Image (spheres, rainbow, N blue to C red):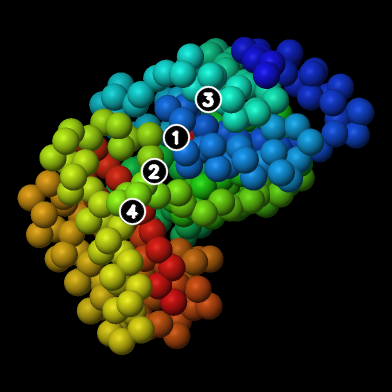
Amino acid sequence: MKTYATSKDINSHIGTLRNEGKTIGFVPTMGALHKGHLSLVELCKKDCDITVVSIFVNPTQFNDKGDLQRYPHMPETDSKLLEEAGCGILFLPGEQEIYPKPDTRVFDFGQLDKVMEGVHRPGHFNGVAQVVSRLFNIITPDKAFFGLKDFQQLAIIREMVKQLQFRVEIIAVPIVRDTDGLALSSRNMLLNEAQRKMAPLIAKTLFEAQKKAAKLSVSVVKQWVIDTVNRSSELSVEYFDIVDSLSLQPVQSWDDAGQIFGCIAVRVGNIRLIDNVRLS
Ligand code: PAF
């Protein structure tokens, strides 16, 4: 695996590979890698000749500075994991490399960021769009791989790709879960023992909700999920929305959209976990 720290060097190496006719696959990450990230790498390797992974903890997408400070940094362990996973190229830039000057672009995502994470993390998706567009310009991938756990992020990135006319195919990769159902997340390692024990209730409740969706109304299922998760002393639901998978707008009935997802954010102490399931 080759590791690059500068845009100029990685861009020039990728240019050479492209001239040789190689297809470039890209997995952007913020590090603290887990099996969810490795599933993106695995799929990227199957689909593309060259797999590029970036690790950059992007400050512009953190609306909560405490969250940024707590975010785990472990570049050496990550690098080893990627090497073992057969990643071809690692991009490990510093902040100056990504933002030589402050990125003042303001994106307009219409209604897509007026719900869920967009409401609870103001500015978050603008920061995600800033960094991902910057990385796409440097890496120039043919395909880029994103986890479905960040359901709203995927919709935002697809919209950004459309607006900025990137020629990249966005591939959505299913959520990877721990044996007890908890969706894998870099933030899971910040949970204490009691919190980690209770956290699987989130996924368990979402899977129960899938069954209930066949029999009960949208509003009843929504309230049931919120009440069930909130019953745990360690968990507090920030939102649970039942939404059209494309517009991300809340639905009133199961007939309101082709695919309907339930998306949840839960506070566990000062850690925030998100998850989602298809409900209809
Ligand atoms: O999903 C993430 O880890 C981040 O939001 C991303 C896409 C790497 C941008 O910083």
**Residue 277: percent from left, percent from top:** 40, 63
**Residue 176: percent from left, percent from top:** 45, 49
Residue at the right extreme, as displayed: 20
Give the residue displayed 7% in from the left and 50% down from the top. Answer: 233
Considering only order in the chain, which callout, 2 or 1, is on the residue closer to the N terminus? 1
Residue 193, located in which quarter of the rendered image?
top left
Callout 4 amino acid = Gly
Q: Is residue 131 visible?
A: yes
Callout 2 amino acid = Leu
Q: Which mark is residue 181?
A: 4
In this picture, is 93 found above or below 239?
above
Asked if the residues shown at circle 1 and circle 2 are in contact, with their CB atoms under 8 angstroms apart, the answer is: yes
Q: Is residue 272 left or right of residue 5?
A: left
In this picture, is 26 found above or below 83?
below
Q: Which residue is mark 3?
A: 81
Q: Which mark is residue 182?
A: none
Q: Which residue is mark 2?
A: 184
**Residue 163: percent from left, percent from top:** 66, 49
Callout 1 amino acid = His
Instruction: Work out whether residue 47 or residue 131 is closer to the camera in this orientation and state it.
Output: 47
Q: Is residue 178 left or right of residue 216?
A: right
Residue 21, located in which quarter of the rendered image?
top right
Circle 3 — which element?
helix
Give the residue displayed 71% in from the left and 29% down from the top. Answer: 139
